[in-house]
Amino acid sequence: MKKYNETSQDGHVCLECGDELGYGRADRKFCSDACRNRFHNRHVQSSRQFKQKVNLALDRNYDILDSIRKTSLKSIEVADLENMGFRKDYFTSYVKRSTKELYMCYDIKYAIFHGRVTSISKMETF
Ligand SMILES: [Zn+2]
């Protein structure tokens, strides 16, 4: 059951505004519903922005990989891709096979071997 404090929660302050929490439930974190809502909205907002950033990076990687895939290049330096805006640390899946690191960006497969991106191919998706 919920615990109630008979006395003021000394040293306990609202996570949003920093005001003293005063009397109330021992596990209270906010002084008011308004503060609770503001706190949660901000956290939802920041994780939404983070997801947006990741999705944008993946989208850009996808377009870059797809444009290289359509050329006759067999491989390309990771650094060259990075100059085009590629972010090596963003991918949708990863498998390590002996010395090769196999990545996927949605339905595009590629390997990174000795600092070069190789074997860019598109998966059959139907
Ligand atoms: Zn507050």
Image: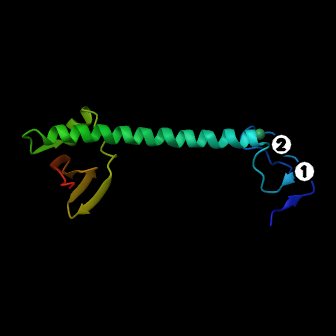
Q: CA distance from mark 1 to mark 2?
A: 9 Å
| Marks 1 and 2, the one that precedes in the sequence | 1
Identified at 19% across, 41% down, the residue is 66
Left or right: where 61 falls relative to 35: left
Q: For mark 1, what is the residue?
A: 8
In the figure, 96 relative to 112: above or below? Answer: below
Closer to the camera, 42 or 113? 42
Identified at 77% across, 56% down, the residue is 27
Type of amino acid under label 2: Glu
**Number of other residues with Cα within 10 Å of mark 2, as a class: few under 14, some 14 to 19, many 20 or more:** some
Type of amino acid under label 1: Ser
In the figure, 95 relative to 33: above or below? Answer: below
Quarter location, residue 34: top right
- Dot 1: element: loop
Contact (Cβ within 8 Å) of mark 1 with mark 2: yes
Looking at the rendering, the quadrant in which ligand 1 lies is top right
Q: For mark 2, what is the residue?
A: 20
The image shows residue 57 at horizontal and vertical percentages of 35, 39
Quarter location, residue 42: top right
Identified at 30% across, 37% down, the residue is 60
